[in-house]
Amino acid sequence: MTDALPLTRELGAPTSHGVSPSEAFAVWLRIALLSFGGPAGQIAVMHRIVVDEKRWVSEGRFLHALNYCMLLPGPEAQQLATYLGWLMHGTRGGLVAGGLFILPGAVAIMALSLIYASFGNVGFVAALFFGLKAAVLAIVLQAVVRVGHRALKNNVMRALAAIAFLAIFFCDVPFPAIVFSAGLLGYLGGKAGIAAFNVGGGHGAASNDDADSLLGDELGAHTRPPWRQSLGVAAVWLLLWLTPVAALLLTFGSANVFSQIAVFFSKMAMVTFGGAYAVLAYVAQQAVENYGWLKPGEMLDGLGMAETTPGPLIMVLQFVGFMAAFRSPGALPPLLAGTLGGLLATWVTFTPCFLWIFLGAPYVERLRGNKALSAALAAITAAVVGVILNLAIWFAIHTVFREVRPLRALGIGFDAPVLASINPWAALLSAAAIIAVFRFKVGMLQTLIACAAAGLALHALGRV
């Protein structure tokens, strides 16, 4: 018997768990439609349905899959869905689970982007997003606190967060450089056995409740691929990801907006550690200051869309790609160019996610108990706290103040708000949102709805 696994057999990944592909499709669609609230909420929904309700996999296997996805760049909730779908039904299952997780949000963001581009200057639309910005600011601040509470366990981790904040806020150090440096430092610290870096800790081997789950401790043939198949998987997904990028560069050159979208968001796909909030600071700075795709407040508008629709928050990049092409359409109608730009950004953002899972998941057992990799992840997560804090301050300045003035000296600098340009209604609404979230523990969706309604009410009263 040859060790090669026929692709057609692997795609279906027949197993003895008894869950049919059609049943899995319905469950993954349900999860996708309920996936509001950022990665924490999305993972909680997935856990409740897949582990507690359906009992497809055990707690141990779920957490082990989550640990692996946390090591990867990209949206961990979408990658976790892809991993679990692959675990249950092979490549086809992973495509269904991961694809469905993206689909509702992609459709919703595209529709909202079309409305935004067409009617964004209409008073009630502007007022709606005026309110959403205040809520998003509170939510980002909440993310700083939540991630910081989990990640900053000792003074070394706190120092990493502080250095990351100072580097990106005052020195414009690129986010990828911060991620790489923190990861390397954490890896070396873990390798050297320095206790301060060993703050993560894996979940170890599969838990003893495997027998109570439908999958049990089963390892299907698709989890033990021969090396030739792994090379084939890498080749297929690299071609799917990079062929459009190369075609655009060769056809239109590097100055074309579609080429810029393809290259920029392909880079982002490789460095989006720590979730959407971490990378958005870098994306916002590049999209606003370098490429001129967006105005400062528009990044908040896009994040407001992503917060109020199902799917990964990183779907906001579709909005960025849409607006970039909409404003530089070339010979195309602006709305068509925007649609193509949004779809292109989505493609190069999420295609690598399937590559990471389908290539790496079969070998994920090798990562169990690897202290150096756990330390690298812990250091990256600590640095991400500083990056998210930078994002929160950047958003706050551009939400509450109408004007900023760049201050530069000795190679460092930042955009200082012009105090006389304060928008009192924006400041008041932002303060109310922050109090609601932190003091009264109001949920994210309720805060967004309340702030949007407040924006519309202020518009009706002629205040904004």
Image (cartoon, rainbow, N blue to C red):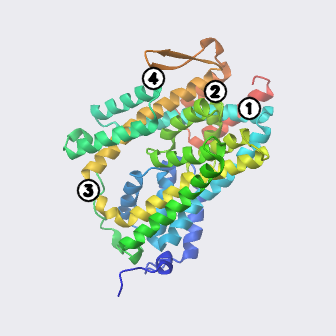
Q: Do the residues labelled 3 and 2 touch (CB within 8 Å)?
A: no
Q: Earlier in the sequence, mark 3 or mark 2?
A: 3
- Which residue is rendered at x = 57% and y = 62% of the image? 99
Report which residue position mark 3 lands on: 369
Q: How crowded is mark 1: few (under 14 residues within 10 Å), some or many (20 or more)?
A: many
Q: Which of 332 and 157 is in front in this view?
A: 332
The N terminus - image quarter: bottom left
Q: Can residue 223 be seen in this view?
A: no
Report which residue position mark 2 lands on: 429
Query: Which mark identifies residue 170?
Result: 4
- Which residue is rendered at x = 51% and y = 32% of the image? 391
Q: Do the residues labelled 1 and 2 touch (CB within 8 Å)?
A: no
Q: How far apart are marks 2 and 4 (CA)?
A: 28 Å
Q: What element carries label 4?
A: helix
Report which residue position mark 1 lands on: 127
Residue type of the residue flagged with mark 4: Phe
Q: Earlier in the sequence, mark 1 or mark 4?
A: 1
Q: Is residue 216 above or below residue 440?
A: below
Q: Nearer the viewer, mark 1 or mark 4?
A: 4
Q: Is residue 398 above or below residue 17?
A: above
Q: What element carries label 1?
A: helix
Residue type of the residue flagged with mark 2: Leu
Q: Can residue 276 be seen in this view?
A: yes
Q: Which of marks 1 and 3 is in front?
A: 3
The C terminus - image quarter: top right
